[in-house]
Amino acid sequence: MRYILVAFLIMMTAQDLLATRDTKEEKQALKKLARIEVAFQKKENPLRFFEPNGAIEKLISEVGANDKKWIFVLPAANSVGKSAASINILGNIIWGTQSEWFEGKRFSNWTFPKKFWYMSEKDTLKNFVCGIDEGTESEISKWFPKGRYTREKAGYEYYSQLVTDNGWSGMFKSYDQEVKQFESDKIGVAIFDEPPPESIFNAVLARLTMGGIILMPMTPLTNSAWTLDRLVNNASQESDIFVLYADIEENCKTHGIRGRLEHSQIERIISFYDPEELDARAHGKFTHLSGLVYKNIHPSTHRHNITPEKFTQKEYQIFNVVDPHDARPPFVGWFAVDSYKNAWAIDEYPNEMFHLIRSFSLTTPEICKIIKEREIANGWQGQKIIRVMDPNFGNKPIQAVGKTTAQYFAACGQELDYPLWYNTKVNDNLFDGHRVVRDWLNVNPDDDTRFKIGENCQNLWYQLTHYSRNERKGRALEIHGPGENVSEKFKDGADVIRYFFMALQPGPAQPK
């Protein structure tokens, strides 16, 4: 009976249908049946009912109609609808045009390999894009038509493989997989949900030799630095790269086109963003990324989740580096080095975001006590730890105590019956230090690196990925070149890492 009603509704418009009924009750009954059928159709094939906001409409139009462009980059604010757009573009390529929004040859007549890869961070795939079981909603289950595809986990925590009823297949890959797992295949659609490590992008690029498209929706935070230099800055009318910026207001009910967010809620969310990330998260803008000192850093390659106490002194040499200050807390970092000269950042102080601290009242003896307690809690013997201090501030005299800063730390250590002797004889040349740190951050052919920063070291990670040069312009640029003229903001954490590697350089020194 329901299928007869469907055929009948298709043959007649709602207006004509209602016109054939005289009574109010009959019209209301037909309206109810129509609503039920629409709800059923939305559940069976949500692709037909996707309605893009203004920015996403522009992206869809370019994907469908612009044959020249095949790399599509969407630097966009959070909550613009980037992932939903990517899934719907993919769905309309797989099953052909599903609504009036998706027109063009790429949607109506796909001629490239019928295979896609959807790539992102593992947690994004697991919790948002793919899902972990049939009972949880994901972007795939939310938008793809029911009964027209099957999924398998294939050994992963999330659904990692998908096969459709019309010959398409796809894989969901995470950025923490090895580069070799992005080799040896031919695909037609590559979707990078947020920027990948550049080595993975290069590997995937070679998978599209038979033609296809790349979609790269992103919030342009620090992990996207290489995309600015390599993709966004090279986009033009003549190039094969299309770039579309999208502000969060694109998805506003009041100020956008077909937006879904209340303006009051947008303002509420924006008010809580970190000021350093506001342009990226609210407006989709790249900010300081082109001037970053260390650009090719990515969490899937350069972070680890090993807790500090796991780095025992039997297997690792522990380093403690201090960058003292006057009116702010010292920036303290702990590092570990194994016998193969692999290095890890493993702990830090303070625990709150360093660049947001506006006042500080602890004394040097109190800081020294914190250092002692932290090291004892991690199971380390203080006399075996190599200690390094900023040579500038470390050798600065403190008139009130008649000692340099480094000497005062040592004296406080004596009061605590704990060895806090810091070496200040480290190379402080910025050019040398930057070169050495880059060497340790360099990614090898196996997509691995010799230096990783712990997930508990939020300040070291944040500062290293925000550490940038002051841009020279005009005559100063002509005379001096871009140089190593760095901004003081976010320099503290970067300096701690630099001093660590400079102290490590010929090889680990021996503690006093």
Image: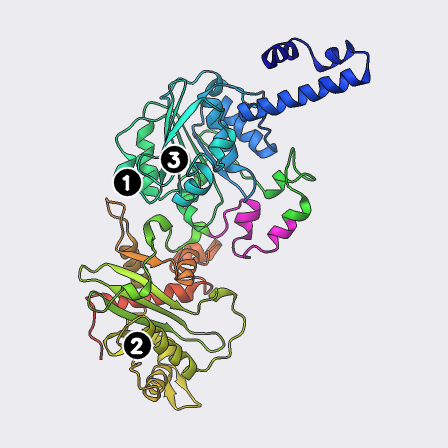
Dot 2 corresponds to which residue? 424
Amino acid type at image mark 3: Tyr
- Who comes first in sequence, dot 3 or dot 2? 3
Q: Position of residue 3 (x, y in %)?
A: 58, 12
Q: CA distance from mark 1 to mark 3?
A: 20 Å
In the rendered image, which residue does mark 1 sit on? Answer: 179
Hey, which quadrant is residue 459 in on the image? bottom left
| Quadrant occupied by the N terminus | top right
Q: Which residues are magenta?
A: 267-288
Residue at left offset 69%, top offset 12%: 13
Front residue of 276 and 40: 40
Q: Picture coordinates of residue 91 (x, y %)? A: 47, 25
Question: What residue is shown at x 73% (from left), y 19% (from top)?
Answer: 29
**How far across and down, in percent of the image, does residue 304 sit?**
33, 55
Secondary structure beneath disc 3? loop
**Dot 1 crowding, Cα within 10 Å, few <14, some 14–19, many 20+:** some
> Does residue 282 show up magenta in the picture?
yes
Q: How many marks?
A: 3
